[in-house]
């Protein structure tokens, strides 16, 4: 009856299950159900919806932090320098700063504006 509202509810319920409301097996089943439901929508549909699904996912990001230095280095591309010459460390830092500003609800022109210059040499 409300697919994007259901998606939002599933995100919250999945994290509640992961937080100990259910068993480990039940949490895995619930997470698989969430993934299946999320795959029904292109990311821009979820992003453009007025349901705060991305905000809910962001709230729980500490649960998904890399658990050891090797995982952090791999998933965050720490120290990676490839043929593209992109400074991935600087880009990640700029992306996090931009994201923090967006979650504060700043209007265009407010806050820092140098996020887009990170890739420029």
Image (cartoon, rainbow, N blue to C red):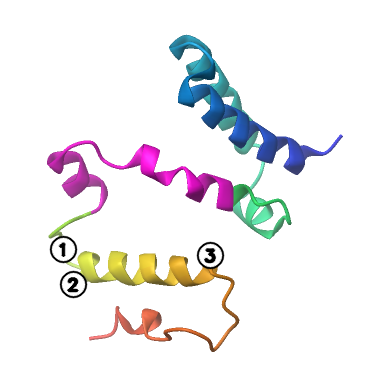
- Closer to the camera in the image, 75 or 64: 64
Q: Nearer the viewer, residue 83 or 104?
A: 104
Q: How crowded is mark 1: few (under 14 residues within 10 Å), some or many (20 or more)?
A: few
Asked if the residue under mark 3 is in contact with the one under mark 1, i.e. CB atoms within 8 Å, the reply is no
**Residue range corresponding to the magenta coloring:** 55-76
> Front-most of 88 and 31?
31
Q: Could you say where residue 13 lies in the image, as x and y percent from the top left?
A: 61, 29
Give residue 78's quadrant in the image. bottom left
Q: Locate the C terminus and report the quarter of the image it occupies.
A: bottom left
Q: Label 3: few (<14), some or many (≥20) within 10 Å?
A: few
Per the rendering, the mark at residue 82 is 1
The kind of secondary structure element at disc 1 is loop
Circles 2 and 1: CB distance less than 8 Å? yes
Rendered residue at 54%/89% (across/down): 109
Q: In which quarter of the image is residue 38?
A: top right
Image depth: mark 1 or mark 3 in front: 3
Nearer to us: label 2 or label 3? 3
Sequence order check: which comes first, mark 2 or mark 3? 2
Residue matched to label 2 = 85
In the rendering, at what x and y percent does residue 46 appear?
A: 65, 51
Element carrying mark 2:
loop
């Amino acid at each position: 009856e409300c697919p994007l509202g259901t998606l939002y509810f599933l995100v919250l319920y999945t994290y509640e299950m992961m937080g100990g409301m259910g068993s480990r097996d039940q949490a895995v089943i619930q997470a698989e159900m969430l993934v299946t439901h999320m795959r029904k929508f292109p990311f821009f549909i979820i992003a453009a919806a007025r349901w705060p699904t991305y905000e809910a996912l962001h709230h729980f990001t500490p649960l998904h932090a890399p658990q050891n230095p090797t995982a952090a280095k791999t998933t965050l591309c720490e120290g990676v320098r490839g043929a593209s010459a992109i400074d991935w460390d600087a880009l990640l830092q700029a992306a996090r700063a931009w994201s923090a500003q967006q979650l504060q609800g700043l209007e265009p022109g407010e806050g820092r504006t140098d996020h887009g210059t990170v890739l420029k040499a």
